[in-house]
Image (spheres, grey):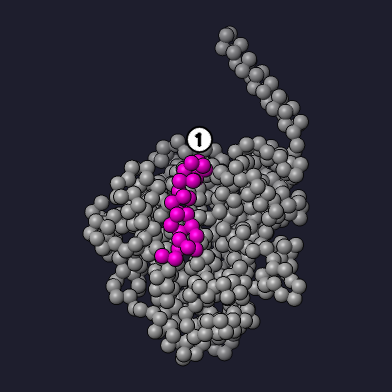
Amino acid sequence: MITIYLLGILFLGSIGWYLMRLLKLAKLPPLPPGPKPLPLIGNVLDMPPHGCKEWLHWLKHKDEYGPISSVTAAGNTIIILNEARMAFDLFEKRGSQYSARPRMVMGAELGGWNRLVTMKSNPIEVRAHRKRINHHIGSTQALASFYPQQDSQINQFLLSVLAKPSDLLELVRSLVGANILQITYGYKVKPAGHDCLIELAEAIGERFNKAIEPGLWLVDSFPFLKHVPKWMPGAEFKRKAEAWRKLLTALAEKPYAFVRHQMAAGTHKPSFVSKQIEQAGGVMSPQEEHEIIWTAGVLYGAGADTTVSAISAFFLAMALHPEAQRKAQTELDRVVGCRMPAPEDRKNLVYIEAVIKEVLRWNPVAPVGVPHTTTEDDFYEGYRIPQGATLIPNIWAFMHDPQTYPDPMAFKPERFLECDGHAPELDPHKMAFGFGRRTCPGRFLADSNLYLTIARSLILFHIRKPVVNGQVMEPPEDFQPGIVSQPTPFELDIRPRSAEHESLLLSSSEQAKSEGHSALLEKIWSMQ
């Protein structure tokens, strides 16, 4: 009898709590508009289906509900921002409230990506990691000491393109990986064939896209499932996450072990990691060593795919828009002449700068960015944003808003030039690398690689649509879904602009004198 009495009190108390919550919410401003949720499942059916272009799915909300909208799924509120000004208002002007990351159980907690600063929410940890990155590569001045590594890697890439242009997309990925690995670890990628770190990073990139895909993993909606034993039926997600975590750990710890080995042998090259170890006098606490390992890991783990996307999109854009290519080459011939463009030339290459901006706008590398969350209840433009809500900035929509960028689907570098009374349009750098306190910490390295690769490719090569059996083939102007959007694979015709330009490349490039560090790294790792 007492048990029934207690259950009755508990039931009535629950009903009372629920009614009081409803009354409290009724007095508050509404959530941003959105599709009507269904009982129990909310807006689960309104989420982007697997494999769709998420940015286009959310863009439909703008026409139907306005620039800010919301959906609910498994009790979580998701708010979609389809206008850039809203992202600036919330993520920059109210950065103290909107700089955390939403809980991602599958990718962050189980898969281990919460060790990377891009996925962290703890402000103390975020500041510590970003401070290390900013000190060594957080400005163009800090990057200057790494220019020789960039110079040799980009020239080697161009030489490889000259030899085998049909492998362009694979060569772009190798270039970006080689550049970041040499700057971060002093590690030389195997110049021909497969490199163990490049292959490992590619595997990680594919899994990251899947690990944080919204709505794909039940455990993200019901976090208690993370405690299910991995041997149980239906717990395949636990086994996947464990395997992914091991891969990610290897990607961070393998090259770190390589640096420590090389430093002990006195054969290391100056790098992001070696400079931090030297700065600490070689004596570090476990926490300090953890920070060094994972700040280095984020430069490659998070930075490679985005730069690959931008450089690949550049080559595609030049083939599709030869008039922009001609204007860029005319400027290079006038300003630089027949030599390799250097960092100090950039200030005088205004059209090249405009091409870089248009590449970032035309195909945003992260079309919906990385979600933010708010740490407290807030109100914005008459709507309620509850604590813990996930906010998705539709960066693709920002970059293709006709109010900001007239004729947004056209590739027009001129939009960023000041001429004939036309004011330059909004610089995409302000959005392409994220917002506020969560702006990409490696953006200066990515931007430097973009400039040198684009300027040197244009001064050396004609980039054209391929011709097969006398027929001009149209490369697909299409970009694949994912947190980082890559162009759909394409083929191009890439040739030296002249014999003089080919000689310039050959004289500027040095063939690798070693087989790279891949074999040595595997040997070092096997001894750990």
Residues shaded magenta: 120-145
Residue, disc 1: 224
Q: In the visual, does 220 lie left or right of 358?
A: left
Would you say residue 119 is visible in this rendering? yes
**Number of marks in the image?**
1
Q: Amino acid at mark 1?
A: Phe
Q: Horizontal and vertical percent for residue 130?
A: 48, 50
Q: What is the magenta segment's predominant secondary structure?
A: helix
Taking depth in this image into account, of 135 and 259 the one nearest to the observer is 135
Would you say residue 304 is visible in this rendering? no
For the point 40% across and 76% down, the residue is 156
Taking depth in this image into account, of 314 and 98 the one nearest to the observer is 98
**Classed neighbour count for the residue bearing mark 1: other residues with Cα under 10 Å, few (<14), some (14–19), many (≥20):** few
Q: Quadrant of residue 418?
A: bottom right
Q: Quadrant of residue 401?
A: bottom right
Q: Residue furthest top?
A: 1
For the point 64% across and 52% down, the residue is 393
Q: Is residue 386 magenta?
A: no
For the point 50% across and 55% down, the residue is 441
Q: Horizontal and vertical percent for residue 412?
A: 67, 73
Q: Secondary structure at mark 1?
A: helix
Quadrant of the frame with the N terminus: top right
Above or below residue 214? Residue 7 is above
Above or below residue 361? Residue 388 is above
Q: Is residue 137 magenta?
A: yes
